[in-house]
Image (cartoon, helix red, strand yellow):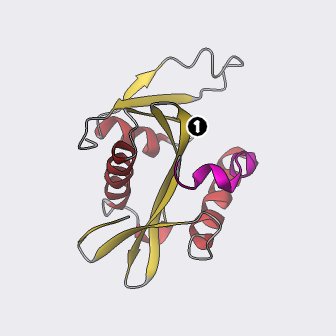
Amino acid sequence: MSVPSVRAIEIAAFAITDPEAAPLVAELADEYFTRYGNTTEMTKYSPDEFAAPGGVLLLAREHGESVAGGAFRRYGTETAELKRVWTHSAHRRRGLAKLVLAALETEAAERGYRRIFLTTGPKQPEAAGLYTSSGYTAVDTSELDPEGYGLLAFEKRLTAAGR
């Protein structure tokens, strides 16, 4: 899938194991380690879960470089789960995450999903801000987070257009 370019940004699908994704995935793993002291989230899911038809990894590319990305996987029959939404540290505060998020929503709707679900950690307030400012609503996490670590969960209902 390729979406029209905005500000010379092209968004395209890649395999999560593609070398093009490696720098973003590595920086995300470093960020998880810095914030949480581990990288278990990065190995929790098989790369196959982010492949078609149930999942996708989208990368935003500018001047031949991957600058942001995000993925979803099947969470339920009509629900996609967002994972790995990330902007390279050198390219933040430019609206790239919102651009990727909108492309993920459109792709999920095109694949028949009617809802997007996601969780994020308590040490990622900028992620929570992105989701709430993009129309996501908070979901009760008592069943997902029985130990009370502060896990945050959000959802958004999709329309046929994805937004």
| Residue 131 on the magenta span | no
First to last magenta residue range: 40-53
Q: Residue at x 31, y 73 (%)?
A: 9
Q: Residue at x 56, y 20 (%)?
A: 141
Image point (25%, 41%), residue name: 163
Label 1: state its secondary structure.
loop
Residue 58, x across and y down, in percent: 45, 61
**Residue sitting farthest toward the bottom:** 63
Q: Is residue 58 visible?
A: yes
Taking 93 as reference, is 161 left or right?
left
Q: Is residue 35 left or right of residue 61?
A: right
45 within the magenta span: yes
Towards the viewer: 94 or 70: 70
Residue 123's image quarter? Answer: top right
Total marks in image: 1
Residue 138 at what x, y percent from top left? 42, 24
Q: Quadrant of the N terminus?
A: bottom left
Q: Answer whether residue 86 is visible to the viewer in this image.
A: no
Badge 1 crowding class, 10 Å Cα cut-off, few under 14, some 14 to 19, many 20 or more, is some
Q: Which residue is mark 1?
A: 121
- Seen at 34% across and 43% down, the residue is 109
Q: Type of residue at label 1?
A: Gly
Q: Position of residue 73 (x, y in %)?
A: 55, 45
